[in-house]
Each structure stands twice: as structure tokens, then as C-alpha cells.
Image (spheres, helix red, strand yellow):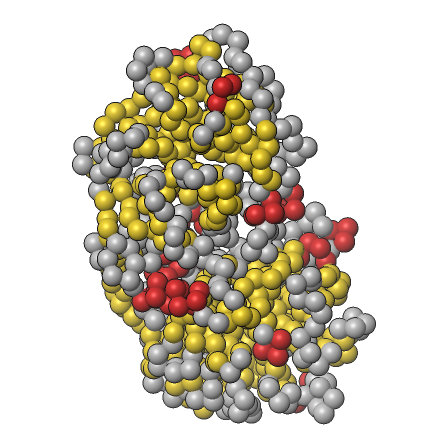
Amino acid sequence: MSIKTVGLTSAFALIASGALADMNFNRIASFGTYLNNGDMSGEESSAEIISATPDGMMLVYSDSPLEVIGMIDISDPANPQPAGTIALDGEPTAVSVLGGTVFVGINTSESYTEPSGHLAHYVLETGELAADCDLGGQPDSTAVAPDGSFVTVAIENERDEDLGDGRVGQMPGGYVAIIPLDGNGMMQCDAMVMADVTGLADVAPEDPEPEFVDVSAAGEIAVTLQENNHIVILGSDGSVVSHFSAGAVTLEGVDTEEEGALRFTDTLTDVPREPDAIQWIDNDHVVIANEGDMDGGSRGFTVFRKDGTEVYESGLAFEYAVAEIGHYPEDRSGNKGVEPEGMEFAVIDGTPMVFLLSERGSVVGVYDMTDPASPVLTQLLPSGIGPEGAVAIPERNLFVVANEVDLIEDGGARSHVMIFEYAEGAAQYPMLTSAGLEEDGMPVGWGANSGMVAGEGSTLYFVNDSFYGMQPSIFEVDVSQTPARITDVIRIEREGAPAQLMDLEGITRDGDGNFYVASEGRLDRGILHAIYHVTAEGEIAATIPFPKEIMAVERRWAAEGITLVGDTLWVAIQREFDDDPENHVKVLAYNLETEEWGAVHYPKEDPETGWVGLSEIVAHGDHVYFIERDNQIADRAAIKQITRVSAGQMVPAPLGEALPVVEKEVVRDLIPDLMQLNGYVMDKVEGLAIFQDGSAWVSTDNDGVDDHSGETLFFSIGQL
């Protein structure tokens, strides 16, 4: 089943215009929070809420796992340096910088029923505790008034989600603390106001759970009561200026099933917004991030006047834009989708901007808010895994996002702080988009890119792997556009129904307009080691299972690429089978005329850490090219390379006999290419396509945004 491109969607038009604009945000640096932890570098750390000093030269973030606040010197923002940590006596929930000091909300609660916490005030240069106020409850968000006259804290007193089906209310209820500051910026704890926000919400009015606070230039405090689906505007004295329900929306064309496919076909009726972050746009308008909690999450954002008048509702536009750049988290379809949570507002280069953080999509939407009733999506930025907090530094044209997820225990990416600069030049991300392509009137999402093959002109094809096991597909890409654009998708079918039990890892053309695809077997899941002949319309015309000689020694790390040379299909096997010598893998050969199997041995690098395997094979000219990579990420990555073997060496021996060992030549170290966007080195570089003129394109696999930043690198390396 083939889906053709229709007219450009608004999202694509925005991405395209952003790419061509004079000014854009591009990432200039990434900082791993573990760099601040000295001897604790092997322990979990996390950058959550982040703030900046007034001169914009120092970042300060909360690190809950280590119970510290961390500091980063960004006097050279392209080369951030660790500036140390300050140890705390509990879990930091938020930070707000004022001058050379920082206010830190610290949770010391021993139980949900006996919440406690305090607001500590530290001198950044010395780490000295300048003051400390007992808050009488569990703090969440903090904010300082723009004029420095007070600091405010959302006292959430969060509920125990294991009790009462996780419902509010559960006592004690929360409130908003407002602490005046003297002329030197010191807290006047004795004058603290505990603003009462009970009795306001329609949902559990007796148990408000303030989540996020922000202070306007006029000194008014906007507060979200997330679980209560309510918004409160307070005066600086704690009086209620206004309050209103965050309301609900009906979503039509949403993916609600976590079934290994991206299908935006369902409807959710009257979904409570349940906002997390809130930001003032001006003294009359606020914007909320509709993350959801108990019953809702409308997957976007909403603008209100402070009197509760709804000005703008994004609906599913943000979610669709995220899906079109490959960041849609399919494993969250049944819950909150892209899960917008954090938010920042700033006026940069004269333009009011909202930065909307997708916690699960790991991407930041940048919106021009010149007209609060008509926000314009200008860019989508790759954030790192789980963006939690953000800060803009308008005086330096900088935007910074803190990513809380640290996957050290799983050998994955660490928590990072990522720095973007607004400057002249084209937007570098996304590198690939499906914007403009629709399937039954809905956007086409994608991800988990694997094998690739060049087509005619500027067209190449790639397949997705088993993360989308209910939707195996071949994607057609036009690489002449910037960003490269997916222009068609071919859904693979068996007898007219979506094919299942496939793990597509390689693709090649058959010379007649059709394809051969390689499926990596996983016998414990019923997935066959096989080659499939697929028509241009997506129908499986023939299945070529691996022979018994291979099945007797197979392991799950099998086919990772396929290419056609004459009448022979060559299949790269990722890692050793039972009968392979150490650091040698088979490259299988299948003769389409004789139906005979054979193989050669490919010598892999010997890694110091983890394992090394093959991820792709492409025949071009007098050589056969491979991607050889380790399974390491970020600064642990050592082997990400393109190699080649002369075609004359590719003479297979029959299976069961001694296999010839080919000699390889390294032709490109891909690690510098994988750092081109100033992030960290991605683990899975899996796709290589070489056009007739020798120009080559490379792609990475984003694992379907599962324990991954979702970032897909898709780039040309010129001619090999």
C-alpha cells in the first residue's frame, strides 16, 4: 500500500520557512551532568530545573538523585565547563537565581501525610547558606518576582498515587508560599504569606496541589493546580485575583493504541488539560503546557487571558509536528502522547517566544507569540532525553534545556544540559521530515530507521525495524530538499493485510522496481530469519528463509543489511553465530538463480567495551561497503565507521566449510559526523545508501524514542 504526498501541511511550511530564515536556534554544546560529580561520576545524576545568573555566564540546575545543585560555567557557551555542586539536606525540587545567589526548594518529607520542606538561599560563589525558610510542606516550583521583591513557591503536598486509585483529595492540601525579599535580596521568613487556594477548583477543591508558579512583570503569580485542572492568579499579597478551570478538549485523529504502529485515527472526548508548566506572555496572557496527570493531558498548549478567557488552543498540532520529525513516542500513545510538560518564555531579538518541552518526545517546540491568539511554530529542537527544565538568556541569544533522564544503569545516554544559540544561519534540525505526507488525511509518523538503499535521481529508501512490528514499512525520501523529506510510504502486507513478525534491518532494489528486505530473526518472538521479496506496492511476493545450516548456529543478532550484486544477495550478519571465530562475522550469500547459500567471514574490530557488529552492507562500484559499529554511546563510543572490501574478495564458500576471511579497509570514521549537531554520539548508526555517482547518505536509528532522545541524524558524507 503506497501513500503519496499531498499539499504541504502548515507544520512543514513552518519547518521549511524556519530552515531558510536569517535567524535560527542551533545547538552549540552539550554538557553531561556527570562531569560535575567528580568521584561520583559512576552514579546516577540528573539535570531537572535550571536557571541562570543575571549576566548569563553561569547555569544552575537541581540534581535530585544526588541531592545537590550543580553549576555550569558558560562564559564560553560553546565550551561549557563544570563549576561544581552544592550539597543539600534533601531533594531539590526547583532553583531560581537572583543576583549571585540561588533559591532552592528542598523536599524533606518523610511521608505523604507529613510533608515538609524548606527554601534554602545559597551564595553561588562560596556555597554558603545565606538563609533558610521552613515552608511547612513539600515544595515544587519556585519563581522570583522580576523586580526582586519576593520569591514564591508552589507547595504541592503531592498525593500518594498508590492510594485511592491515585486520586485527589488526599490531605493535607497544598498552598502557595510568598516570601518577601529585602533590599539585599534576603528572605524575610517571618513575613511569609501562605496563600490559600482551597475551595476554588471544581475537582477536589479541598485538596489543591499547586504544581508550577510564574510571576508577571506586574507582580502577579500564575499557579497551575495540575491534578485539580485549575489555574489561579494571585496578587503578591496572596489574594486571589482570578481563578478558572483549565477546561477540556476533544481530540480527533489521535494515536491511542500502543500496538507497534503509528495510526492517528482515534478520538478522545472531553480530555481535561491538567496543565503542568505555566508562563506569563505579558501582563494579561498566560500559556499552559497540557501534560495531564490523572485523567487527561491534551498533548498541546493553551493560551488564556488572566480572567480565564481562552485565546488559543493548539489541539494536536504540536503532537503532529513532533511525529513528522520522528519523535513521536508510540509507547505513550495510550497515555499522554508527546507529554508537553516544561515551558519557558522570553523575548529574544525582539520576538516573544514560547519554548514548549515534550518530555516523552524529547523535543522542544519554538513558537513565535507575537500574537497570543495565533502562535506560529518556527522550529523544533532536539533536546536530549526527557527535557524537564529550560531557561532562556535573551541578552546572549541563548536557550538552554535540562534533560532529567540518566540511563547509566542501562548503559545508555546520561543526563545532559544542551545549549542553543539564536544566530544567523539555517536550522540544522530536523534532518528528515515527513511533513506534507498524509495517510487517509492524517500525518505519517516514522522512526527506528534501519537499512537504506539509493534509488533513482535524488530518491532513497529506508525501512523501519521491529519497534513498529505492526507496521513494517518502506519509506521513500527525497534528499534534494532541506530537510530531506519523506515523500511516500509503502506499507508491507501479506495477502492484503499488514505483515507481522518482521524485523526489517536491510533493503535493496531488485532492478525491476521491487525490493528485497532482510529481517533479523528473533525465534523467541516468532520472527523468522529471512529475506523477503516485496513488490513496489508492498505485497510480499516471496519468502527466502535462512538455510538449516544457519538455523543450527543462529543467534538473535543476525541480518543487519542486504545488497544485490549480479544474481547474488549478500546479507551482513551483525554478530558472531555459534560456529564463528571470535570477532569474525558471516556475510551470507544467496544466489537467486541456483538458490544456493554461501558466506565469507568479515573481521571485526576488537572492542575494549561492549560489542562490535555490522549494521549495513552496500555494493557500489568495485567494492562492498559496510557500517561497523560498537554498541556504545556518547563519550564511550569508539567504533562507528564505514569500511569496504574489494568486490573480488567476495567469493563465498559453501556453508559448513572453512570460510574465506576478507580484508577490509576503513574509509571513514563516522564519529565526527555523529557530532555535527553538537550533541552526543548516537549508538546506532545503521543506514547507508550510495548513489550511482558515489555520493553517500547515512542514518541513525532512534529506537522509536524508547529510552532514546528520538534524535535521528540523516546526512550526506559526500562521495566515497
Residue drawn at point x = 23 percent, y = 48 percent: 3
Residue drawn at point x = 65 percent, y = 46 percent: 635
Q: Which residue appears farthest toward the left when viewing the image?
A: 496
Q: Nearer the viewer, residue 318 or 155?
A: 318
Residue drawn at point x = 36 percent, y = 22 percent: 566
Residue drawn at point x = 24 percent, y = 51 percent: 4
User: Horizontally, is 476 left or right of 277 in the view?
Assistant: left
Residue 522 shows in this picture = no
Q: Which residue appears farthest toward the top when viewing the image?
A: 657
Name the image quarter holding the N terminus.
top left
Q: How many marks?
A: 0
Q: Which residue appears farthest toward the front when viewing the image?
A: 693
Please tell me in which quadrant of the rendered image residue 14 appears.
bottom left
- Image position, residue 316 (x, y; %): 32, 65
Q: Nearer the viewer, residue 666 or 431?
A: 666
Up the image or down, 577 lies above or below 416; here it is above
Q: Nearer the viewer, residue 353 or 66?
A: 353
Q: Nearer the viewer, residue 40 or 117?
A: 40
Up the image or down, 621 lies above or below 40; here it is above
- Image position, residue 513 (x, y; %): 26, 35
Up the image or down, 358 lies above or below 582; here it is below
Please tell me in which quadrant of the rendered image residue 30 appears.
bottom right
- Image position, residue 11 (x, y; %): 34, 65
Residue 72 shows in this picture = yes
- Image position, residue 439 (x, y; %): 24, 52
